[in-house]
Image: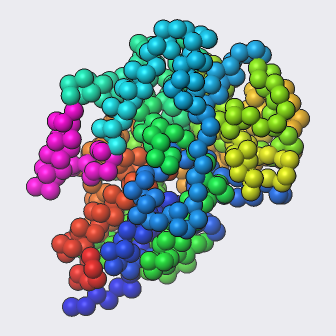
Amino acid sequence: MPNSKPYDAIIVGGGHNGLTCACYLAGAGLKVRVLERRAVIGGAAITEEFFPGFRNSAAAYTVSLLHPKVLRELRLAEHGLRIVERPIANFLPLSEREHLKVGASLAATQAEFRRFSVRDAERLPAYYELLERSGGALRELMLQTPPNVGGGARDLFAALRAGNCLRHLDMRTRRDLLDFLTKSAGDLLDGWFETPAIKAAFGFDAIVGNYATPYAPGTGYVLLHHVVGEVNGKRGAWGHAVGGMGAITQAMAGEAERRGVEITTESEVARIVVDERGAQGVQLPDGRVMEARCVVANVNPKLLFQKLLDPAVLDADFQERIRAYKCASATFRMNVALAELPEFTCLPGAGVHEHHQAGIIIAPSLAYMEQAYFDARTYGCSRAPIVEMLVPSTLDETLAPPGRHVASLFCQHFSRDLPGNLQWDQVREEAADFVIDTVTKYAPNFKGAVIGRKILSPRDLERDFGLVGGDIFHGALTLDQLWSARPVLGHANYRAPVRALYMCGAGAHPGGGVSGIPGHNAAREIIRDFRWGRVNGKRRGKA
C-alpha cells in the first residue's frame, strides 16, 4: 500500500540539532518538514540586532563543540560559515594589578603560571595530556548511540561497541575517565594545582550552565564535556562564528533547503497526534493537523512529554521520571552595546589587545564560585556573580558600527526560582545592573561605556527559547542523566516510548552545547528504522 502521508518526518523545533537531523534525513531520501515556533530559525543559536546598529549572538554565544563531522558533511563552510579562533582562551582579571592568561600556547601559558607557581607550570603539560586522553575516549562515545538497559540484540551490540571503545584504553586512562565521571572538578583540580586562580581558570568549564558548586560530585564530567571540542582542527580551542551563532544555523538551514527540507517559522506545535499505531503527525494551535510517518522532537524532554503528549500514552513510572528530570542552569545572559572597549586596570592600554579577544572570566577562585552557588540557593542570585564576558566585535567587525563594540555576558549563578514570591520580571534590571557593576570593578570605564543592553534572565530563556528552567543543556549533565540514562533509562537510543516518535535535541545523548551530535545520532537511528520498516507506512525513498 503506498504511503499517503505528505511527510516522512516532521521535526518539532528548528534549533541546530533539529536542522542537523533534518539534513541527514533528507540526504537519505526522506521528505522532511521543520516547524519552528519563533519567527527566526535557529533556536538558541541565532544572531539578532539587540540595539540599533549592534548585532550579536542571542543566547548561545561561542563555538568549540560543533562536531567537525557535522560541519564537513553538512557543507557549512560552503554555505558561508567561517569560524575564527580566539588568540588566547581565557583572561582572568584578579585585582587592580594582577591577571592570568591561559591558552595562547603551552609555553606561553607555562610562563604565565610561573608567575604564580613553578610547580603548577611544570604540571601543566601532564594536565593537558590527561584532558586529551580522557577527552579522546569521550569523543568516540559521543557519536555512538547508547545502549538501552534491558533492550534487545541491537542494544547488546551497542553495549559491546561502547565496551570495545573502553577496552582499548589503558588502565590509567580508564581510571582518569572514571574520576571525571564521578568526582568533583574542585577535588580533581586541587590534586593537580596549588594556585587558586589557575584552578579557577580550568574550573570555570565545570560550572558553565551547571547549577552546582565546583565541588559537587560529577562536575568533573561537565569540565571534560566542555574541553572535547575543536576549532579549525585545533583541539580544545574556542572560537567565534563570523556573523554570530546565527551564522551556524543559517548555514544549516541553507543545506537543509538544498536537500529539499521544508522549513516553516511561526509554526507552533500544540500537540503530537498519537493513536494505537504511534505518532501520526502534529496538531497546530488552530486545530490543523500535519501528518507524517514519524515525528522528531527537538525540544526539552519536559516540554515533549508533559506538554506535547497526552499523558495517557505514557506509563506512570515514565511520567514520574520526567517530572524528576533536572533542568536548571542558573544562567543569566546579557548582550551590551559599548561606546568603547573595557579598559582593565590590571592591563591598561588603548586599542584591541589579545585579552579583549579571550573569554574574560571574573571568578578568581573555586571558593568564589562555590560561594556564588550558595548565594543563589539562599538568596536567588549570587552576591558576587561569576561572569564570562566576550567582546566578539574585536574578532568580527560586522557586529558593531566602526569604533563601537558588543559584549556577551554569560553569568552564574542566578536561580530560576526566586525567594519571597519575587518574579524575574521584577528584578531583571537590578540583576543586570549588578552584573555590570561586577565587571566595572575590574574595568572602571565599563559601566559608562554601556549604551544599550538586552537581558535574558532564566525566566526569559525559558519563555523565549523553550529552555525549561532556563537550562541551556535541556537537562543537567549529571551522572543520573547521562549516556544510557539520558533522558530516562530505557529510552536513551533517541526513541521515545511511543512508536514513531523520536528525540533529537540536547535532552538526548550526549547533551548540551552547539555540537549537532544529538541531531546527527538521532537521524542515524531514524534512517535505520525506515530501512527496517519500523515506522508508520510503507518504506520508500533511498532510506
For the magenta stretch, what is the residue range?
140-169
Q: How is the image coloured?
A: rainbow
Name the image quarter holding residue 7: bottom left
Task: Answer whether residue 500 is visible to the viewer in this image.
Answer: yes
Q: Residue furthest front?
A: 107
- Look at the image and say whether residue 143 sits in the magenta stretch: yes
Q: Is residue 267 above or below residue 486?
A: below
Name the image quarter holding residue 49: bottom right
Judge from the rendering whether residue 363 lies leftward or rightward of residue 526; answer left or right.
Answer: right
Q: Considering the whole magenta stretch, tell me its main secondary structure.
A: helix
Q: Is residue 292 above or below residue 216?
A: below
Residue at left offset 21%, top offset 28%? 170
Could you tell me residue 26's position as x and y percent?
38, 75
* Closest to the observer, 382 or 197: 197
Could you tell me residue 64's position as x and y percent?
51, 45
Task: Answer whether residue 332 is visible to the viewer in this image.
Answer: no
